[in-house]
Structures are given as structure tokens and as C-alpha cells.
Amino acid sequence: MAKEASNLQSLKKQNRITILNLIREHHTISRQQLANLTGLTAAAITGIIRDLVAQGYVIEKGLGKSSGGRRPVKLQFNPEAGYVVGVEITRHRTTLGIVNLNAKPLIINHYNIDMSEPREGLTSLAAEVKRMINESGIDTKKVFCMGVAYPGLVDVTTREVKRSPNLGKKWRDIPIENWLQELIGIKVFVENNSNAAALAEYSFGLGKGTKNMAYINLGEGISAGIILNGMLAYGFKGYTGEIGHLVITEDGPLCNCGNNGCLESMYAVPALVRKANNELSLYNQKDPLKAIWQEKGSVAIEDIIACAREPETYAWRLIRQAGWHIGKGIAALVNIFNPEAIFIGGILAEAGDILMEPLKESMAKHSFPELAKEVKIAISSMRRETGFYGGCAVAMRALFQGGVDALLNFN
């Protein structure tokens, strides 16, 4: 009897999730249309809508056109019914924010949190999240969960972080979801940063509805999130998309992964900054980037991107060289899974056409012609914040798949 009651409760919750998602997907929809789409009875639909309206998830918004009877009441999803926290962790910058259930941001803040020690870094992160929620004025009961875009390998079977070469050697086998849930008191979902960003691009970016696509993260590392048939591609353990660890020269610099000559070790942001600071002493005194180097003692990626806008300068050549070699890595991706579209994000994408022109040319040269001809390549509309929105997308995916008890928790 108890098992039957539990199964009934599970079915009722799943029906509510299904109805809520259909209302989310349509600008307006009627009860009759919902009944036609789901096969549920009119009485069942009426009961579910009554609960959803009472809880604030659905708004009744005027009357639709009649097809021969009473005009139907139009139903709309209310994105202010709740909120999720999004987080992107990187080596030098952690982004936190709160968005409504349509991913409209209320708050986005940036913090310098030292993540070299996992427990200390996550404790600091949790403190900032709690402070942000408290200062937002939002009812804490309406903050349903948190999604984290994380720069490393996340085991989809254990939900542990297995390794993060870019954060340091101490990031091994860390139960990040459990730690953060204990510290903050809300459900936490962690995803590899490129997977998360791909999900954001697919859910509410330029790739919305593009069933086969990839997102390429060009930041502290180089990696890809891949969407196949509308679903994130995980592989066996969830470690797909590590294109930054394609070896492009055997005698290249040592990479964080332990190999030599990886794409990431030569053309990710830290490698480009290191290369510039090592080489600028040899360049013409009139070069704009060298002038900054002489004045400040070192240059950052923002300096390189700004100076690259002047053609034929050191920075211009450096960014174009990076674009050409990154294009080779993307060509491998195109040849392997034949995407419809590829979106480029991360701080390096802020170089715009200076990066994209050689990247596209190289991709076309090194891909199978019929595949290269069909694929669309564009810069992500979310630019540098795609990872943050990825954290939000991960939280909302779990929320609207029924993975958070705080949602639709009716008697």
C-alpha cells in the first residue's frame, strides 16, 4: 500500500512537471491544448493548473480565440515564481549570480576566490553565495537550487570532481556537490564548464533548438561541450570534449595534463600571456603592446586583445596564430561528429574577427569539405559570461526534470 501511494505521488509530480514544461515552452496555451498534448483528462488538467496558479508558477492571462464554444483562458509561465543561483569557477575569477526561471539575471558579481585549496575555496564561495542571497531581498524559499560550471573532469556516475589541471593538484576526487550543499543549504548541481556553457547556448543562446552543436571555451583552458540530438554528450564517464589536449607538436611545452605540445599548452589564455611576456623584449619599441609591457612590467590578456585591433602588430599576429591552430582542433571535432553549428566563447572570443577569420579558414582547410561547408561558426552571444549562464542552465535542467524537491512540492 505504501509503495502504491509513493508511486501515485511520483506520477502526480511527473504530470505537474510535464504540464509546467509545456506551459514554459509556449508563449500562451489553453487547458484544452494541454489535454490534447498530454492525453490527460480535462479534470486532471484542471486540478494541476489550479495548483500551479495557487503556487504562482502559472498566470491566467486573458482569453484566447473560440473554436466554437466558450473562449479558452490563456495560460502563461511566471518566471518570477522562483530563482536559481549560477556559478562559474575559474582559476582567477569566480562569477556568481541569481537569475529568474527564464534566466533573466537579477545579480551578477565577480570575485577573486583562491581555489588552490578545495575546502577553503569552496567555503569562501559558499559564504559569498549566502551573502548574495541574503542581500538580494529574495525569499530564501524561492531560491530553489544552484548550478556550478566547473573547470575540470566531473564524473557523471559519482558526481565527484576527479581532476582539475587548471585549478591545481589538490583537486582530485572532491565531492563538490555534497560539500556545497552542506555549506549553503540548497541543492547543488555541478557540471564541466564547457558542458554547462553548451547547455546554456542550446537552452537560451544563439544555439536554441540546434540539435547537434558544440560550444568551444577559449579561456584558461580549451575545451568543448557537445550537444547530440538535443542532449549533452557525456561518453563513458562524462569526460568528452577535451580538445585542448590534442597534441599538435610532440616537442611543445609541458601541459597541465602531463603531456607535451597540447593545443591548450600553447594557445589557451595563460599560454598566450606567458608567450607575450617572454617575447616582447625582442620586439620593436613602437609596438603598442611592448609599450604597455615596458610601462607595467607585464601584460594581461585584456592588453593583448586591445592591442590586437591594430593590424600587423605583435598582438594581432599572436591572436591570429592562436585562431589558426584552434581552428585545427575544431576541424577534428567537425570531422568526428558533424555538427550543425559551433559557438565560440570565453575571454579569447572577445578578440572577435581577428581570432575568428583565421579560425574559420583553418577549420575549412583541415575539415572534410562537405562537413566544413555546412557548419555554422559564430561567437556566443553571452561572450565571457557563457560559463555563468551555463551554471544557471544546469540548475534549471535539474529543476524542470524534477530533480529538486522544492519545486512543485504539493500535498
Image (tube, rainbow, N blue to C red):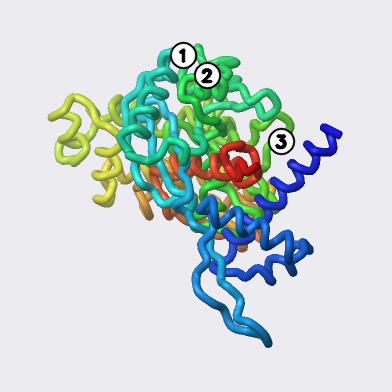
- What is the three-letter code of the residue carrying label 3? Gly
Q: Nearer the viewer, residue 346 or 199?
A: 199
Q: Nearer the viewer, residue 329 or 36?
A: 36
Q: Nearer the viewer, residue 210 or 305?
A: 210
Q: Nearer the viewer, mark 1 or mark 3?
A: 1
Height in image: 220 above or below 369? above
- Identity of the residue drawn at 33% across and 39% down: 137
- Identity of the residue drawn at 65% across and 45% down: 401
Residue farthest to the left, as pictured: 295
Image spot of residue 104 (x, y percent): 41, 52
In this figure, which residue is indicated by the disc labeled 1? 119
- What is the three-letter code of the residue carrying label 1? Arg
Q: Secondary structure at mark 1?
A: helix
The image's mark for residue 211 is none
In this figure, which residue is indicated by the disc labeled 2? 179
Height in image: 188 above or below 381? above
- What is the three-letter code of the residue carrying label 2? Trp
